[in-house]
Image (cartoon, rainbow, N blue to C red):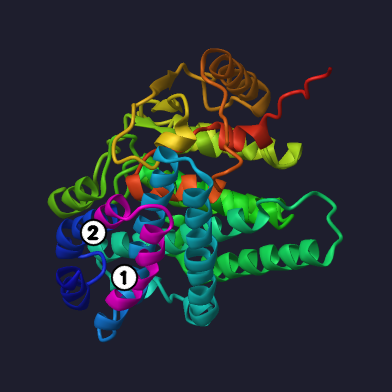
Amino acid sequence: MSYVSAQAADFKHGSDPWQLQLVPNWKQFVDDVLRESAGARGPALIPVALIIVRQHAADNSSFETGWIELVEWAAIALWKGHKEYPDEVVRTSALRFWREFYIAELDRFYRAHIGALGTEHSIDHTALGSLIGAVAASYIAYWHIGRLGLLSVDIVTGLEPGDTTGQGQNRIARLNEVANWAAMIMNANVAVFRPVLDIQHIEVFLIMETLRNAGRVAEAKDIIEALVANLYPRRLGQSSFPFLDGGNSLDNVFKQITTRPDKSPALAQSSFFVLMLLELCCILPDDVRDSLVSLIHRRLVLGAFDRGDPGDCLPINLMSWIPPDDWAKLVFEDEIPEGQGVFVAPLASGREATALDILPSIRKLVAEMRRVGPRLQLPSNIPLAATILASLRHHRPLPPELWRRWAFPEPEETA
């Protein structure tokens, strides 16, 4: 414990020493405590340990977000323990830590810092005119958008449509407040519209959920248009940033921008992110959906110019994923079955394709994946936000059904 505390005091959050030494040591410490302490005693010791670490790291200016990361790994370990020992004592302990410690800490953090984060270019200034800085700014922006999304998803849990009770109205007010916080960060920082990793589809999904939970899904149109506008030059190979690719990583992105010439070619071969973006459009009103679907298909899937010569980019392979059975329980593990990757046949040919040409292929894909894949079961005893956090932390894709259930609702079964 003293070793972890010393590292927390010395290491900058996000640095190599933090990721390669402190995080593994902290995860091992938490696992040891939970394994060696029976019942509720182990979970009760974790908040105490976190407070001790925080006291030791009081002079570390980067520790406030680092503290949240340590809390997140502890929460994941507690839900993993609940999966392995599914008794009520363990579940109650995990849920208490989740709500009273993690969610409460997120709420406290953003109430304290949203004013600064919502200041113009508060995160963008990290770029300092460099490509490496621009990647760092994007990473920070998506970190915050992701946490606000988790807060929204957790607040909406258990809220019934049309709930007019005092508790229901309080939740609705909080959902709007969180959506306002997310909007402040997005309005202040262009880094939000500069994703660098295909896995950041998670945060974009959470942006949509934050708006949808607050009854403001129509605001997603401007966000999707801004994402497409930023990604389009990269898709054409007219940017120093590589386009999103299903196999990329942060290390690969840094390597590409530091070793390639200023005009990198578009290197993407496949993308989960782009297919999700197309599917998210289907949550929007039909007229908005149709224009966005054709835009994304032309610019990001085909990589074609809007007018004149269509260019010589090859279409990217759209990619989806069928998760393993019991995904919501397995997701807390360090290693899980990979599931099945799905590469999608071309949705339509030619840049003139409209939504009428493209949408039938998407609907057919969704129907076929539902037919052959396991039905997504979201357990009632584990918060959905906790499973999404585990995906964020382990850098694993989300099951597409998390947005398809809204974009392509299935008919209700009749008795």
* Range of magenta residues: 32-53
Asked if residue 65 is positioned above or below residue 37 in the image, the reply reads below
Screen quadrant of the N terminus: bottom left
Say whether residue 193 is visible: yes
Residue 407 in which image quadrant: top right
Q: Is residue 94 magenta?
A: no
Considering only vertical position in the picture, is 94 above or below 400? below
Identify the residue shown where x is 30% and y is 77%. Answer: 52
Residue 12 lies left or right of residue 151; in this view the side is: left
Q: Amino acid at mark 2?
A: Phe
* Residue at which label 2 appears: 29
| Residue at 61%, 17% in the rendered image | 367
* Depicted 364 relative to depicted 157: above or below: above
Q: Residue furthest bottom?
A: 59
Residue 49's label in the rendered image is 1
Question: Element at badge 2?
Answer: helix
Label 1 to label 2, Cα distance in Å?
10 Å
All told, the count of numbered labels is: 2
Residue beneath the point at 61% across and 32% down: 404
Label 1 close to label 2 by CB (< 8 Å) = yes
Comes first in the chain, label 1 or label 2: 2
